[in-house]
Image: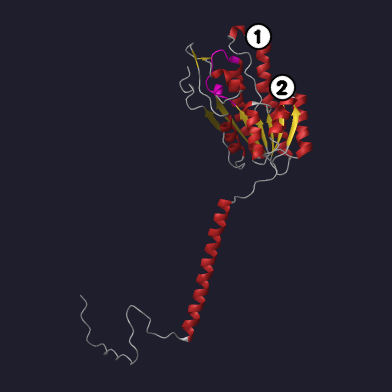
Amino acid sequence: MNAERTDLPDAPEPAAGPTRSATSDSTVEPTADSAVGTTVEGVATAAVVAEAESVVETAVEELVEPAAPQDPRIAVVTGAGSGIGRAVALELLAAGWSVALAGRRPETLEETASLASARGGATLCVRTDVARPDDVAALFAAVHERFGRLDLLFNNAGTFGPGGVPVEELPYDAWRHVVDTNLNGAFLCAQAAFRQMKEQEPQGGRIINNGSISAHAPRPHSVAYTATKHALTGLTKSLSLDGRPYRIAVGQIDIGNAATDMTARMGSGILQANGELASEPVMDVADVARTVRHMAELPLEANVQFATVLATNMPYVGRG
């Protein structure tokens, strides 16, 4: 225990003058030095506040008006004369993209272009059979000549082939036509896009392959279509890996029952896995187009590898 000290001198008497509250300095007149300190402190505080306000204002502006993407953005859409291809082309054009419309029928491509005339982006119609290497080469040469670069390939062209034909009765020519269109055509277009995206400045771009619910589970009597869609998944994965060094992002959208001419028979009844006929719900094709646009407009540092978009109540999860 410390002993109390008794040898300390008496505390001096306080000097006369105004009293000072223990909790307030309001009775003390500032000296010249303290006034300067207060001014400097006030200026510093004001500067910090102004900087904070500037940061907040900039953040708000970026939220309201995001940085403009590269302009123009250039896309190739195959199978653009109808269905999903047309819907995606129109969605991209409405968002300011310029789009090369590729397909086998020039009249339907021109129809798509006429629907897009008021949507903002430029169009280029190129008659293309994606199963023919020379047609594909001509398509991408035309795109390079017209636009100078390529930011997106939507690999959409495809065919179901003869429907309802048992595997033992499927003609080889029919099988070959489906494989040539759905798989070989997708490869040829992706290869041409790779070449251009790899060499252009700035380097890179995106490829989105149109898969299908049939890339996961088949319908009865759909051997050619289902085989090609399963193969397309392998193509997507391989392209995605090979594209990494060149900033080429590759993904796939698997679509179920979008309302197009190809799915018109869904309402009247379609063969199910249990052998029965049943009508199936469909969804608006515009919902597919918006999903493709979302995938397309991601920065190349981000990629939707696989997306599944389907009519909510279609019998997919329980198929088989």
Dividing the picture into quadrants, the one containing residue 12 is bottom left
Residue at image location 33% in from the left, 87% down from the top: 19
Taking the image as shown, residue 220 lies to the left or right of residue 193, namely left
Q: Which mark is residue 131?
A: 2
The crowd level at tag 1 (other Cα within 10 Å; few <14, some 14-19, many 20+) is few
| Colour mapping used in the image | secondary structure
Q: Position of residue 18 (x, y in %)?
A: 34, 89
Dividing the picture into quadrants, the one containing residue 168 is top right
Q: Position of residue 104 (x, y in %)?
A: 73, 23
Please provide the residue range marked out in magenta. Answer: 211-223
In the displayed structure, would residue 38 be above or below residue 223?
below
| Most common secondary structure along the magenta stretch | loop
Report if residue 245 is visible in the image. Answer: no
In the displayed structure, would residue 281 be above or below residue 37?
above
Question: What is the three-letter code of the residue carrying label 1?
Answer: Pro
Q: Which mark is residue 171?
A: 1
Decide which of tag 2 and tag 1 comes sooner along the chain: 2
Report if residue 88 is visible in the image. Answer: yes
Question: What is the three-letter code of the residue carrying label 2?
Answer: Ala
Q: Nearer the viewer, residue 273 or 98?
A: 98
Q: Position of residue 199 (x, y in %)?
A: 74, 39
Taking the image as shown, residue 16 lies to the left or right of residue 47, namely left
